[in-house]
Amino acid sequence: MNFLLRLLVTALAAMLTAYVLPGVRIKDFITALVLALVLAILNMLVKPVLVILTLPATILTLGLFLLVINAIIILLASKLVSGFKVDGFFWALIFSLVLTIVSGIMHSLAGTGADD
């Protein structure tokens, strides 16, 4: 149940973030739900592999390369989800930052934190 609530909150945060950023478009709320599910799967399966493969770059940049990995995950999700478009790497990077902040605030308000 907590997973479904987290998906709904993330989808709503994605819709809000796409509304604010002109370089990101989400067709409707169903697309945002699919995007939230795809992002959850990519963060579970692909992100750990990318983090391990780029560990030297991550250490060298004191962790800032993780922002690049997040942007790559967003770009990959835009290729997989029809109705979700990102205009380029810069917009994917900004979208990942804003989505993290907005969804973090919304998760804390909804009471769907990691400790639940």
Image: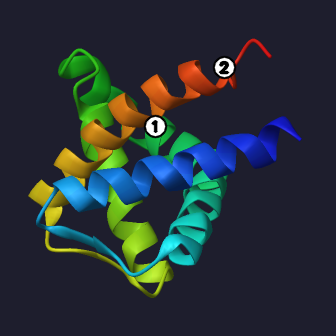
What is the distance, in whole Å, between disc 1 and disc 2 at their CAs? 23 Å
99 or 61, which is in the foreground?
Answer: 99
**Can residue 29 be seen?**
yes
- 37 left or right, relative to 88: right
Q: Residue at x 66, y 50 (%)?
A: 7
Q: Does residue 45 lie above or below 80 as drawn?
A: above
**The label number, if any, that marks residue 62 in the structure image:** none
Q: Does residue 87 lie above or below 15 as drawn?
A: below
**Can residue 69 be seen?**
no
Quadrant location of the C terminus in the rendered image: top right
Looking at the rendered structure, the secondary structure element under dot 2 is loop
For mark 2, what is the residue? 113
Residue 15 position by quadrant? bottom left
Label 1 Cα neighbours within 10 Å, binned few <14 / some 14-19 / many ≥20 = some
- 10 left or right, relative to 67: right
Farthest residue to the right: give it: 1
Q: Residue at x 78, y 48 (%)?
A: 4
Q: Residue at x 74, y 42 (%)?
A: 5
- 24 left or right, relative to 54: left
Q: Amino acid at mark 1?
A: Val
In this view, the mark in front (1 or 2) = 2
In x, y percent, where is residue 89? 15, 61
In x, y percent, where is residue 101? 34, 29
For mark 1, what is the residue? 51
Looking at the rendered structure, the secondary structure element under dot 1 is helix
What colouring style does the render use? rainbow
Farthest residue to the front: give it: 109
33 or 77, which is in the foreground?
Answer: 33
In x, y percent, where is residue 69? 34, 45
Q: Which badge, 1 or 2, is on the more N-terminal residue?
A: 1
Label 2 Cα neighbours within 10 Å, binned few <14 / some 14-19 / many ≥20 = few
Q: Amino acid at mark 2?
A: Gly
